[in-house]
Image (spheres, helix red, strand yellow):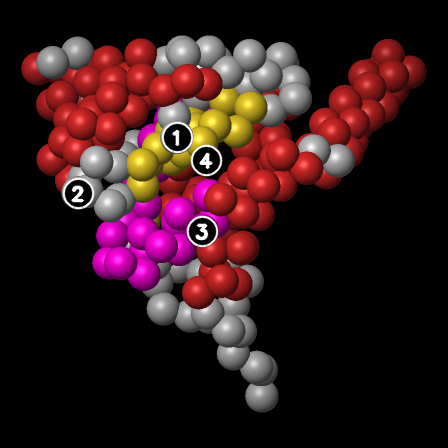
Amino acid sequence: MAHQVTPRINEEFVKSIVQLQTMAADAALHELIVRVVNMSVAALQAGNKLMFAGNGGSAADAQHWAGELISRFNFDRPGLAAVALTTDTSSLTAIGNDYGYDYVFARQVEALGRKGDLLFAISTSGNSKNILRAIHAAHETGIGVVGFTGHAGGAMAEACDVCFRMPSTETPKVQEGHGFLGHLICCLIEQSMFKPVASK
């Protein structure tokens, strides 16, 4: 059995390494990261918040990143205003029942979002209808949008203010790239806003 799975194990490691190496060598991607960190810090320092939305694995990313900011990432510091739009089951099911699943995030953006906030919209295809409606609602409210999607970008490529397009067409690898970038952005936001407290 081991001889059957070993080649696949090596193949998946190599694909992940190549993707990270591609991202590491992409100067334009690095510039986008700096831009998004600056946008996030500016929003938070102005008393605004970061909102996160996605479906399935991307919903897990939304909750994960919001949690990193609200609690802590690398060191103790004050909590940061971050909201995952994927967690309120009463709102999600009410909106889905009354308006349809395509509106589960847009209605929350309309209700909770304020001009100056920032929406992180996550979709591996770039074509998730509920994410695209949330992006539209954000723009209507004066909320900036940071997109995370796959290589093609889908409709999100043009709809977002900034769009991170992973160098892969495979959903699991796209999600791996999103996870790395999400952690990096949380790290840099924290580092930009606070000085680590030296341990005694």
| Disc 3: which residue | 38
Q: Earlier in the sequence, mark 1 or mark 4?
A: 4
Query: Viewed as shown, does residue 177 lie left or right of 42?
Result: right
Kindly indicate whether the residue at mark 1 contacts the one at mark 3 (C-beta within 8 angstroms): no
Q: Nearer the viewer, residue 111 or 138?
A: 138
Residue 35 location in percent, x, y?
49, 44
Above/below status of 194 relative to 150: below
3D distance between C-alphas at marks 3 and 4: 21 Å
* Closer mark to the observer between disc 1 and disc 4: 1
Is residue 100 in view? yes
Q: Earlier in the sequence, mark 3 or mark 1?
A: 3
For label 2, the SS is loop
| Disc 4: which residue | 61
3D distance between C-alphas at marks 3 and 1: 13 Å
| Disc 1: which residue | 161
Q: Amino acid at mark 3?
A: Asn
Q: Amino acid at mark 2?
A: Arg
Query: Viewed as shown, does residue 99 lie left or right of 135?
Result: left
Above/below status of 39 relative to 137: below
* Closer mark to the observer between disc 3 and disc 2: 3
| Disc 2: which residue | 114
